[in-house]
Image (cartoon, rainbow, N blue to C red):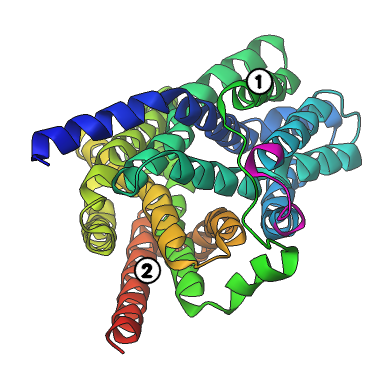
Amino acid sequence: MSSSAIESTGRTAMSRHGWVIFALSVTAFAIGTTEFTAMTVVPAVAEELRISVPQAGQAVSVYALGVVIGGPLLTALAASYSRKKTALLLLALFALGNASTVIVHSYSTLLISRFVAALPHAALLGIAALIAAEVVEPEQLSRAIGLVMLGLSVATVVGVPVAQWIGQEFGWRWSFGVVALVSGLALLLTWIFVPNQAPTEASSWRKELQTLKNSQVLLNLLVGALGYGGLFAVYTYLGPTLLHVTHASVATVPVELAIVGVGMTTGTLVLPLVASKALSKTIGWLLGCETVLFALFPLADTHLWSLSVLLFLLGNLGALAALLQTRLIEIADESKSVASALNHCAFNIANALGPFLAGLAITAGFGWGSSGIVGAGLCLAALLTLGVAVRKQTSITSN
């Protein structure tokens, strides 16, 4: 078959399953919106519930904890269900958790609602990737997963600003109300367009948890936690850096955050296309280039134009979620569901690891720009971990 015929066949396959991918991407959009919006409404939550800002911030930490606990637990428990049924149940729980945040009346109910909303987060994204993998041809795998994960990136550019605006106009609670509505839309689209597929033969929670014994899976998860940790190290402290180092106006902060989101969207669109031919090499080149870019951060943060360019390029690291998800599906043998969910647990660990290490550097007196150096160190560690994983995989294959 000629290359043009193969390309035409690929386009037809993607078109035929376009609504399935769209439904899954809307799910990712809802998840990305609630996760990032929660970070922006902390002061408003503290004021209304009459708690301190650090206490309100604990809701973000509780959400991350829920993601890490719920990912492998719910995925393993749902091993005997079809993936469509699992997705529908998880979406219902996710919508319920966000809807309950709208009516919280105390600090304790806030934490409970955010924990409930977080439980299906990783499992949902993992199942979404597996459904996408099932409806396309193998050569379209990285592209399909990239399109699903695109919802996370678009959330940072569109979902979060819209949710913020609604929160400012009608109160912070309705920021989560919007997420609940979008989750309901994702549930409807999933019910209509995602095909019914029987669970993998002999699936069980015990079998799914066997993935924790796979060293390739564990190394892949470590790459994600370290690499994405670098991005969160800079992203978390970008606001203070802009105000105190770049001396930009307060109005500039959301613009620069959006530039990171545009970079994430671009990377998630483009890099999975390249990765379809050389997945591990693409991940390696991405981590290598981003290590250099992070190291340049302290040199670029004094000028807004240079910082803006750098932030766009750093945002491309967002493609790591789709690339590592694709690699996990290839290396996880039969226990793909839990492995896919754990991928997003790793990114939530990154959400804690990166800011924590960058915070230590800043507190030690190295300045706001040191977040970039921390990011470079984490990205380099991710690259070295990937090298170990690829070398072990090559050794196993050759034997």
Residue 223 location (% of width, % of height): 42, 66
Whether residue 57 is visible, yes or no, is no
115 vs 198, left or right, is: right
Name the one closer to the observer, 14 or 126.
14
At mark 2, the secondary structure is helix
Q: Residue at x 45, y 45 (%)?
A: 133
Disc 1 vs disc 2: which is toward the camera? 1
Q: Residue at x 67, y 44 (%)?
A: 82
Residue 263 quadrant: top left
Region in magenta: 76-85
Quadrant into which the C terminus falls? bottom left
Point out which mark residue 382 bears. Answer: 2
The kind of residue tagged 1 is Leu
Identity of the residue furthest to the top in this view: 169
- Look at the picture and state if 178 lies above or below 144: above
Q: Magenta segment: does it hold 77?
A: yes
- Look at the picture and state if 192 lies above or below 71: above
Of callouts 1 and 2, the N-terminal one: 1
Residue 375 location (% of width, % of height): 37, 60
At mark 1, the secondary structure is helix
Name the one closer to the observer, 234 or 351.
351
User: What crowding class fits label 1: few (fewer than 14 Cα within 10 Å), some (14-19), or many (20 or more)?
Assistant: some
Whether residue 322 is visible, yes or no, is yes
Residue 91 location (% of width, % of height): 70, 34
Point out which mark residue 103 bears. Answer: none
Q: Which residue is mark 1?
A: 188
The kind of residue tagged 2 is Ala
Name the one closer to the observer, 82 or 344.
82
Q: Residue at x 61, y 21 (%)?
A: 192
Residue 162 location (% of width, % of height): 54, 17
